Amino acid sequence: MRTLEQQVQVLRAAGYRVTQSRVAVLTVLAETDGVLDAATICAAGRELHPKLGRVSVYRALELLAELGLARRVHGANGCRSYARANWQEGHYLVCQGCGQVQEFPCDGLDRLVEQLGREYRFAVRHHLLQLEGLCAGCLDADGGSAS
Amino acid sequence: MRTLEQQVQVLRAAGYRVTQSRVAVLTVLAETDGVLDAATICAAGRELHPKLGRVSVYRALELLAELGLARRVHGANGCRSYARANWQEGHYLVCQGCGQVQEFPCDGLDRLVEQLGREYRFAVRHHLLQLEGLCAGCLDADGGSAS
DNA sequence: GTTACAATTGAAACAAGTTATCAATAAGCA
DNA sequence: TGCTTATTGATAACTTGTTTCAATTGTAAC
Ligand SMILES: [Mn+2]
Ligand SMILES: [Mn+2]
Ligand SMILES: [Zn+2]
Ligand SMILES: [Zn+2]
């Protein structure tokens, strides 16, 4: 789990300025476990940086996603929401109960992806694996009553 | 590969009416290998059913996706495009060269998903695996010059 | 074939989400 | 501290998706 300070270093190292807007967006994402859409991030970000504008939020999210510091999460009605991220490739669990998003490493997946590439003669450049279901906490809370 | 006739049966079996709008959308999707957005599907669908309206295209796509006859494909700038589909779960290859979308069966993936569920104590309900890269055809055409 | 009825449609108006513009600002550097 | 330029953000434009509701059409019963 990268700290905010480390994330800021990623920004700087990539040659981008460490601006109040970008830090605000990064901070908002760091303070939640779930997914947030641009409007929510903007509202929350204004408590840190009151002048924050909608447009900057969109621009920051796009940049942060490129750098692997944020991730656009695929939802049933579009992918308008983002979660914090620590890697560029997408391997994550989305809890349908509490909305929490959890990244996970992908050892087995990378092997599988490589194998699929050979099988279908396809040169894989990126891969996205998203699992939806119920997290441990929500399973316990439900007592197994979840459909 | 399900035929159009079989797809129509899926619609009917699920209790939905086989309307000109739905058949038009299904046909347009069947006639391409790639992904199409709603506007494009609407335009193409009007050659089959001139009265076809935008709204019906959105509604048809949502329904067809539910039935596993179409799939919303996750793109870099949102997921506004659809491809034909034969299953409800998402395992597919998206070619960045020609735009072709290819579904594939998921034996190994299902095992992996099950294992991940145990490892993270997460009850998986749905999974999405999307690989992006270059298909065999585009690899040959490029002669290996692709980045 | 005709009739009855609910599911479905589609034009129009609306709402939401996203991007272009461009003068003003502030981040990094000397 | 001042210089330079990337970045910002208000506004306006645009694109995408949804609501509404009277008209239509698919289906099954007659
Ligand atoms: Mn990986
Ligand atoms: Mn599967
Ligand atoms: Zn949960
Ligand atoms: Zn998506």
Image: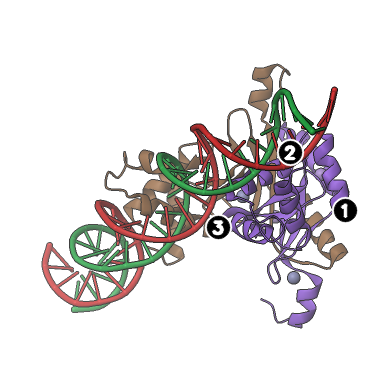
Chain colours: A purple, B brown, C red, D green
Say whether mark 1 is within 8 Å of ligand 1: no
Q: Which residue is mark 2?
A: A126
Q: Which is in the foreground here, disc 2 or disc 1?
A: 1
List x then y, in percent, for residue A111: 85, 43
Report helix, strand or loop for mark 1: loop
B57 and A2: which is toward the camera: A2
Type of amino acid under label 2:
His
Type of amino acid under label 1:
Thr
Type of amino acid under label 3:
Asn
List x then y, in percent, for residue B7: 47, 52
Q: Which residue is mark 3?
A: A77
Residue beneath the point at 27% across and 43% down = B50
Report helix, strand or loop for mark 2: strand
Q: Which mark is residue A3?
A: 1
Mark 2 nearby-residue class (10 Å; few <14, some 14–19, many ≥20): some
Report helix, strand or loop for mark 3: loop
Mark 1 nearby-residue class (10 Å; few <14, some 14–19, many ≥20): few
Distance in Å between CA atoms under marks 2 and 1: 25 Å
